[in-house]
Image: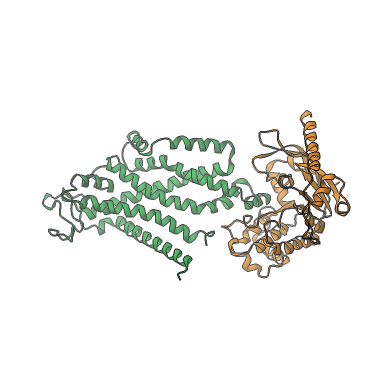
């Protein structure tokens, strides 16, 4: 039995039949790093949001199951679901500038979960917060914990968000393009940090990104999405030797390479897009008849 | 060269302190009116009618800002009138903020049909002309201090509801709200700890503005004689009486007008000043 098992998940734009996720199925083993890649709007973030129960109001799950350790999150009553997600899962959000509450100090933003969900007392939660900040290489945890977010740099805030995600020892972390909003120089460090923390804690990681280079570095498997449809799911090594699907091959070919920065970029060819769009439409036809 | 930021900060500080100074003086004058006022504000004496303020020829000692056409001391009446103005500003402002902000938070965070109901209510409410609406309300409720306060609350809650709703919606879309929910926080507790503190600076500014507006509305209502009983001094009432004798005794009109003007201005500047000073995001 896999640790996270998503089956036939469909999400629509609320009040319409327009699907944002089209019968997505996905398996993640415990301690595995799964990359979710695709163009903007392919639905890669949507999967993480549906899983964590933070879909925007405009989106609605219409069918499918999301099983975490055998429990279907979608059929749990809201309160139990929140508690379960709070204990087992965490989020590393995209933009560190809006992911910390500007009017609260860092300390409660890390410790709240430990107190609310795990039932720890404040003292124990505070000790844990310092410990976890040490782990992400923040030099003066005590000072940082007493600071407001606007007093800290973007890279520092992302470190705090990573620490905060790992603080309660979740079994699964969703990282939603965690390096996109950062400086290129900081990106590398943050990526390395997430990778190290994941290895150290043995957490399963769902890594949402549009950067195949990042996937090659830290993921074991990856899922390629187009228009809310799973196009290909593969082992990372096999994928980079030669993707099975034409769209994946084109996507890989479109990735800029450090080895030859002068080379022209190769866009995904028209026929390939037409073919994958036809696949999306075919999926919708069979869905409408169901 | 002048450091722009320091300059902004200094002028912001100045504006805060000036408005605090005026409001503090007003509060002290109003609270201790029986001790501070040089005369009985209700005492009429036709022998001392229309005395000019102290720097003009013909002024009499003890009547610093002159007297009206019934010989009542203008300064004392302003101080007593300040009591009414401040009580209205405080009670009406706070109640309006509480009701409007609560509805705005609910509408902005919970969205859905709750938002629909509250927003449509606000739209309908705002279609009524406010002054006419308040006069109508007083006509139904009867005159008196509590009616004035109630009228202001009933009319002005929409101002808070609209702005706070928009702000709560913007905050609700932030990643930190999503993070709090992933961390198992309930909706109600999310509103209290994540949304409310970030909307509070806006509420504070609105509240002080609302206090100024409440002072004006009270003045308008007492100007048209719909506030409290005509015997008690109010700024609006004084302005109405002063209007009749503007050519013989301008001071009866001008001094309450200045008091009104400075008070409303101070309230609005107080809000801006407080925001500049205490909003953690701006610092």
Q: Position of residue B5 (x, y in %)?
A: 48, 65
Q: Quadrant of the C terminus of chain A?
A: top right
**A228 and A114: which one is in front?**
A228
Residue A122 in the image: above or below residue B68:
below
Q: Residue at x 78, y 59 (%)?
A: A198
- Shade representing chain B: green
Q: How many marks?
A: 0
Q: In screen coordinates, is A26 left or right of B172?
A: right
Outermost top residue: A289
User: Residue B159 appears in which quarter of the rendering?
Assistant: top left
**A255 and A112: which one is in front?**
A255
Outermost left residue: B47
Q: Position of residue A160 (x, y in %)?
A: 67, 61
Q: Residue at x 72, y 61 (%)?
A: A187
Q: Position of residue A277 (x, y in %)?
A: 78, 38
Q: Position of residue A226 (x, y in %)?
A: 77, 43
Q: In screen coordinates, is A222 left or right of A78?
A: right
- Shade representing chain A: orange
Residue B91 in the image: above or below residue A129:
above
**B91 and A174: which one is in front?**
A174
| Residue B232 seen anywhere in this rendered image of the structure | no
């Amino acid at each position: 039995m896999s640790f996270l098992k998503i089956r036939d998940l469909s999400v629509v734009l609320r009040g319409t039949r327009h699907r944002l996720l089209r019968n997505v199925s996905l398996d993640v083993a415990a301690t595995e790093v799964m990359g979710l890649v695709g163009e903007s709007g392919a639905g890669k973030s949507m999967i993480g949001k549906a899983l964590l129960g933070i879909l925007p109001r405009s989106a609605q799950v219409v069918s499918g199951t999301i099983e975490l350790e055998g429990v279907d999150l979608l059929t749990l009553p809201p309160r139990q679901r929140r508690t379960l997600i709070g204990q087992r899962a965490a989020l590393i959000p995209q933009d560190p500038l809006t992911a910390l509450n500007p009017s609260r100090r860092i300390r409660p933003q890390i410790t709240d979960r430990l107190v609310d969900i795990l039932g720890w007392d404040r003292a124990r939660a505070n000790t844990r917060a310092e410990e976890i900040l040490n782990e992400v290489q923040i030099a003066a945890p005590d000072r940082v914990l007493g600071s407001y977010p606007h007093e800290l740099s973007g890279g520092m805030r992302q470190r705090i968000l990573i620490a905060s995600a790992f603080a309660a020892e979740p079994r699964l972390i969703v990282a939603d393009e965690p390096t996109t909003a950062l400086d290129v120089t900081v990106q590398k460090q943050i990526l390395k940090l997430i990778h190290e923390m994941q290895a150290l804690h043995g957490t399963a990681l769902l890594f949402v990104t549009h950067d195949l280079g990042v996937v090659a570095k830290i993921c074991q498997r990856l899922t390629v999405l187009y228009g809310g449809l799973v196009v290909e799911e593969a082992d990372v090594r096999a994928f980079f030797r030669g993707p099975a699907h034409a769209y994946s091959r084109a996507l890989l070919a479109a990735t800029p390479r450090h080895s030859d920065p002068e080379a022209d970029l190769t866009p995904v060819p028209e026929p390939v897009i037409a073919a994958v769009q036809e696949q999306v439409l075919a999926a919708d036809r069979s869905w409408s008849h169901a | 060269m002048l450091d722009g930021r320091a300059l902004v900060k200094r002028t912001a500080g100045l504006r805060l302190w000036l408005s605090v100074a005026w409001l503090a003086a007003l509060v002290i004058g109003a609270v201790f009116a029986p001790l501070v006022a040089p005369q009985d504000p209700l005492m009429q004496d036709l022998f001392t009618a229309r005395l000019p303020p102290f720097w003009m020829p013909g002024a009499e000692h003890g009547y610093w800002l002159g007297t009206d056409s019934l010989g009542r001391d203008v300064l004392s009446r302003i101080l007593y009138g300040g009591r009414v103005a401040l009580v209205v500003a405080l009670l009406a402002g706070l109640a309006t903020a509480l009701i409007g902000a609560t509805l705005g938070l609910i509408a902005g965070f919970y969205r859905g049909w709750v938002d629909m109901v509250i927003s449509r209510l606000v739209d309908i409410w705002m279609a009524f002309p406010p002054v006419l609406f308040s006069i109508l309300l007083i006509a139904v409720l009867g005159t008196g201090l509590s009616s004035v306060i109630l009228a202001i609350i009933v009319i002005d809650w929409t101002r808070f509801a609209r702005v706070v709703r928009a702000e709560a919606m913007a905050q609700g879309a932030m990643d930190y709200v999503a993070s709090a929910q992933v961390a198992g926080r309930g909706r109600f507790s999310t509103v209290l700890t994540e949304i409310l503190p970030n909307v509070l600076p806006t509420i504070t500014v609105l509240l002080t503005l609302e206090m100024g507006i409440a002072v004006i509305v009270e003045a308008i209502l007492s100007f048209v004689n719909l506030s409290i009983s005509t015997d008690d001094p109010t700024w609006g009432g004084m302005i109405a009486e002063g209007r009749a004798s503007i050519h013989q005794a301008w001071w009866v009109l001008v001094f309450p007008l200045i008091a009104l003007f400075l008070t409303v201005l101070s309230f609005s500047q107080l809000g801006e000043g407080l925001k500049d000073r205490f909003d953690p995001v701006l610092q």
